[in-house]
Amino acid sequence: MGWNFLGIFFVVALVVCLVGFYKYVYFLSIGYGFAVLAIGVTMAIMGVAGIFNMSLAHYILCALFVVYGFRLSGFLLFRELKNAAYRKTLKEATGEESAMPVFVKFAIWICVAALYVAQTSPVFFRVLNGGEVSAFTWAGIAICIGGNVLETIADNQKSEQKKARPNMVATQGLYKMCRCPNYFGEIIFWTGIFVSSLDILIGIGQWLMAVISYVCIVFIMFNGAQRLEKRQMARYGNDKEYHDYANSTPIIIPLLPIYHLNKIEK
């Protein structure tokens, strides 16, 4: 199964995610993106060094990890440094840093590093199993690119709309399709990674790692949307425009009529 190589990727993710001990939310934000980037770089270096027999498509998948991770962590870091309102919201959402025991941070550190390795594992399994590039590979690449583009546009549109209307959620552009198009883009990206390996996974171990990690990221996105909705309800709960928008726009999947993930009082 290539546990020794997965172990290397795990160590890489652990090193990058050390940033979470400075601020624990970084385990799931800046550390997340840069860990995916670092795993992609490590895998590509192994290919160049001849450790793996990698084709152009494999290098493209590694490059997608790099682009995805750099864009996500760069965006989050820039937003935190430049946006005082976001820093306030982040502090309110995460609570007091000192209130979290060290052993809890340590457990989170281990778990997120393992998750990030599992998320990227479909690309590694494609390389490890020596499968030829197939339609699944190219379909996965296309889906990944679409998800990354969607997430990038959504983040930029949200930033611009919040500048114009700081006291209202983003409602235009992609936000007409759903209220969390950036989360939807995230799901699409990892769907592409999963699809890219569907014809090459071997054994229950590889299938479990690929499937469980994919289910986890989808769950995390829905959980994130639920928490975001709760914060928005606390802030905009008395705003009729917000209610009209929230009650008529799917929360995360366009066209899927799921409008709320929290209990809404009539």
Image (cartoon, rainbow, N blue to C red):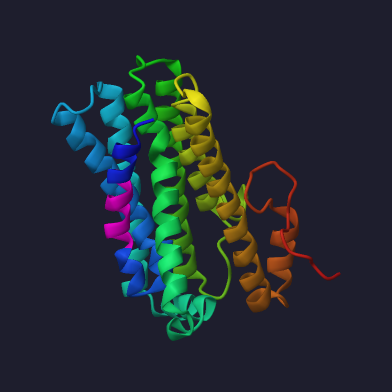
Q: How far from the left and from the top, in percent, is residue 89?
A: 49, 77
Q: Nearer the viewer, residue 53 or 237?
A: 53
In this view, 259 is above or below 88: above
Residue 98 located left or right of residue 204: left
Q: Which quarter of the image is occupied by the C terminus?
A: bottom right
Write down the quadrant of residue 26 in the picture: bottom left
At a point 27% along the width and 37% down the height, the residue shown is 63
Residue 74 located left or right of residue 135: left
Total number of numbered labels? 0
Residue 41 located left or right of residue 213: left
Does the segment drawn in magenta span residue 11?
Answer: yes
Kindly give the residue lying farthest to the left in the view shown.
Answer: 49
Please give the range of residues in magenta: 9-17
Residue 142 located left or right of residue 215: left
Residue 108 visible from this viewpoint? yes
Q: How far from the left and from the top, in percent, is residue 82?
A: 32, 73
At a point 41% along the width and 59% down the height, the residue shown is 110
Q: Which quarter of the image is occupied by the N terminus?
A: top left
At a point 30% along the width and 65% down the height, the residue shown is 18
Q: Nearer the viewer, residue 119 or 222?
A: 119
Mostly what secondary structure, the magenta segment?
A: helix
Does the segment drawn in magenta span residue 143?
Answer: no
Q: Nearer the viewer, residue 73 or 96?
A: 96
Residue 74 visible from this viewpoint? no
In this view, 103 is above or below 219: below
Q: How far from the left and from the top, in percent, is residue 171?
A: 59, 59
In this view, 171 is above or below 98: above
At a point 48% along the width and 19% down the height, the residue shown is 199
Q: How far from the left and from the top, in percent, is residue 62?
A: 29, 36
Q: Nearer the viewer, residue 97 or 230?
A: 97
